[in-house]
Amino acid sequence: MRPATATAVAVTTLIGVGAAAIAAGRYASDLALKTPPGRPLPGDPPLTVHATTPDRVTLTRSLASLRPGTYGLEGPDVHAVVGPALDDVPHAADTVVRRLERVSHGSLEPGTRVRLTPQVHSGDPDSALGLKYSDVDIPGELGGLPAWFVPGARDTWVITVHGLGATREHPMNIMEFLHVHRFPVLDIGYRGDVGAPRSPDGLGHLGDSEWRDLDAAIRYAVRYGAQHVVLYGWSTGASMALHAAANSALRDRISGLVLDSPVLDWEATLRNLAAARGTPGPLLTLAVRAAQGRTGLHGDRLLEAADPDTMRVPTLIFHGPDDNLAPWYPSRELAARRPQLISLQTVPHAPHAAMWNADPVRYEEALRRFLTPLM
């Protein structure tokens, strides 16, 4: 082969390999960045319903079905709520019996395939909790943002913002608690949610741009009577809360942050999401680079927002070592740097965004102690 021809072949081969790598990275980043609201996050395998009674359900035995606490149980056209496993009830060795709290809709039939989900309630605040509420439309930079407003007597509002793979139904886990303590609650949807505008590139940005929709919600709350706001976010919603506390023009109105399973290392979360959706290990670095190139994600912005030396408001973090999507070590380090301002409630045996589910009583008591000085 002549030198010129050999060189041309080599260059063509390299271009082909490079194009394939770019395409693979783009595909892998899609797996992580295109997570529709309400789509289950990757994690536990589905479970099979083996039997039910009015107050019990028998499920496939696994680490997930043995997990302590209270969870939603979702399957095709069915949503139910299960409590703890019942160890003293006779059952086959390959099954586990959990307390069946209620069936919200549909029916649990033997053979139905279901998943445990942190989302306990289905519907809206009235149908799920019996709470009076209003549907409101928040003016955002991309268009109107849907939200539920549950009124309360206090002039400090709590603005709740869900995270990856969830919807406005997830924050209803603590909405009744907040209502009992007389906080007005603004539960918001943001870009990419049902009824909200799409992100211009159609991708999730792990809170890096979505926080501006939370900023719009702060402006809405202040316009309609809030003297102060507490930002309460799960997962990427927690990242949004940190960005807003650092960058909002109304950050002086923010009196506290509650961060549940916060995404503090977006590269690690992106790799974990891509890996959990089946991306081969060699492509994970490409996925991170592709995501950064396509969305403009920059870790330094999140690091600045979560810099413990510049954080100004009391912050409560719920997180634990069993979160396989958002590593908890950054939460531990954050709390250790500013223990007078930032407290960490360590929650064992809880997957991502399920810190309340693992032990609702303990969770709500920690939340009560944190919010009392802010009332």
Image: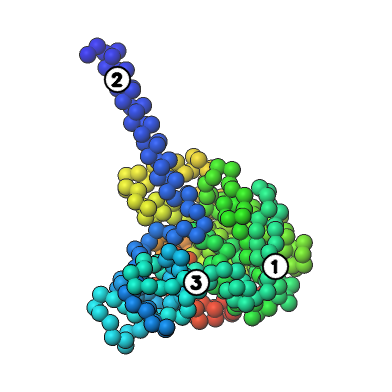
| SS label for mark 3 | strand
**Mark toward the viewer: 3 or 2:** 3
Mark pair 3, 1: CA separation: 23 Å
List x then y, in percent, for residue 140: 68, 52
Q: Mark 2 vs mark 1: which is more N-terminal?
A: 2
List x then y, in percent, for residue 63: 32, 71
Mark pair 3, 2: CA separation: 62 Å
Per the image, the residue denoted by label 1 is 134
Q: Amino acid at mark 3?
A: His
**136 to the left or right of 281:** right
Residue drawn at point x = 40 percent, y = 45 percent? 28
Q: Amino acid at mark 1?
A: Ser
| SS label for mark 1 | strand
Total numbered labels? 3
Of 267 and 33, nearer the camera is: 33
Per the image, the residue denoted by label 2 is 9
Placement of 187 over or under 132, stated as above or below: above
Q: Quadrant of the C terminus?
A: bottom right
| SS label for mark 2 | helix
Of 135 and 222, nearer the camera is: 135
List x then y, in percent, for residue 299: 51, 49
